[in-house]
Amino acid sequence: MTTRELNDFLTQTGRGTPMGDLFRRYWIPALLSTELPEPDCPPVRVQLLSEKLVAFRDTQGRIGLLDEFCPHRLVSLWLGRNEESGLRCVYHGWKFDVNGACVEQMNEPVECSFAHKIRTTAYPTVELGGIIWAYMGPQAKMPPAPHFEWTHMPESHRHVSKVVEECNWLQALEGGIDTSHAPILHRNISTTATRPGIPLSGPFVRGGAPTLEVDSTDYGYRYAGVRPLQDGQTYVRAYHFVMPFTQIRPQQFRLQGERVRPRAAGHFWVPMDDENCMVWNWMYSFGDEPLTEEDRLERGSGNGPDHVDQTTFRSFRHKGNNWLIDRQVQKTETFTGIDGINTQDRGVQESMGPIVDRSREHLGPADRAIIVARRLLLQAVKTVQEGGDPLGADTSYYNARAVEQVLPKGVAWRDALLSKMYPAPEPLAAAD
């Protein structure tokens, strides 16, 4: 059982907290590249780990990620002018470059200027895979850039979206790495259902309750839900958990006989503050076939423009309107009556409250991935406090890939799938 004190320890990520110090040792998704589409475009607010920041792309195309508030009189720099290689506060004209250095003070005579003495917080960034990533930790401990396999696919073969979730990052993560819920929460209950969901005819639903197997790795763990089928075969859905907030999963639930497309997908659950997180969703094709425009709409997941405001990244279905649950649909078509696979996830996770009280829960064998994740997070905090490097801060996850497959009777999933989960790495070349 998790105590209330331990629950607070695991869920708080602000500056100076143990988990906050851990998170600041990784590259963190900050914003989509498309949010800063061109040099000198308008700045964008960003909230990470309870810090309010502002991002801008300067005249040379460089990314700045600064404390939102001008160190002069604490006016928001989001109001600022992005011009001539810097972001200028509109109040008194103090201007900052992408490194946080104050380069001009319009309200001070030249002979009285003390701009060279002024700096504001600025975080390093790297642009990969259509995402601008931030590093918020000690410069000497900066890890290698986050070269997931999909970040080096051509733009035609990858897609990224994001959506705000109104709860703590950890319960969102734990919902994502929990594989036993998927064929229950997400199932269709009718063969004629028109709404997206896991079909009754597929192995995910036909299979029995899973045996969950977890293998420790130097980036976190790989895990598999192994479900028995009636004919002696097994359905295996194998994933990766990359510390501290990443899941790599098979891309889709396939109907029997449907053409297999070589794809994978995943999520990042990134704390905005202790009661809100940003869920990042990515998918990619590692075969010759590019993603389609229909793929990019993410209609079935509830992450695309039909479901999420693309200016605020807030879902149209949220706890304030009960996720627009349709009780008649719940009776006749889908298990929840909520449209969208990931909308259903957000619904159950948000329903727990902003920060769930884990001292009241009762975990079982099907929750093994959650139990191990908590243990790894606690160990990683200890490692950082002792001056070491936490799991997942190196390069060992670069070629990790998720797979699912129906295996013949007697075939062990590790024998059949490990080579597919770690395909031979190819030389990395920037795709952006």
Image (tube, grey):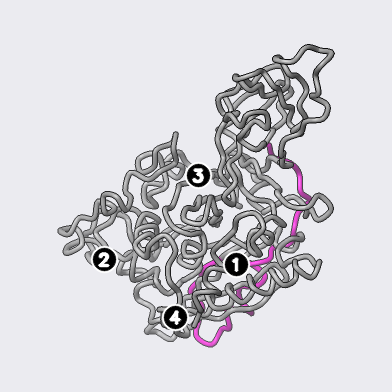
Could you tell me how far apart the alpha carbons at marks 4 and 3 are, in whole angstroms?
30 Å
Q: Is residue 171 left or right of residue 315?
A: right
Q: Amino acid at mark 1?
A: His
Taking 229 as reference, is 134 above or below it? above
Look at the image and say whether residue 407 sits in the magenta stretch: yes
Secondary structure category for the residue under label 4 = loop
* Circle 2/circle 4 CB separation < 8 Å: no
Q: Is residue 140 left or right of residue 398?
A: right
Res 335 label: 2
Q: CA distance from mark 2 to mark 4?
A: 19 Å
Horizontal and vertical percent for residue 335?
26, 65
Q: Is residue 273 left or right of residue 82?
A: left
Task: Compute the Cα span from label 1 to label 3.
Answer: 20 Å
Name the N-terminal-most of marks 4 and 3: 3
Mark 3 highlights which residue?
161
In this picture, which residue range is highlighted in magenta?
Answer: 403-432
Q: Nearer the viewer, residue 31 or 150?
A: 31
Given the image, on which type of amino acid does mark 4 rest? Pro
Q: Nearer the viewer, mark 4 or mark 3?
A: 3
Up/down of 395 relative to 278, above or below: below
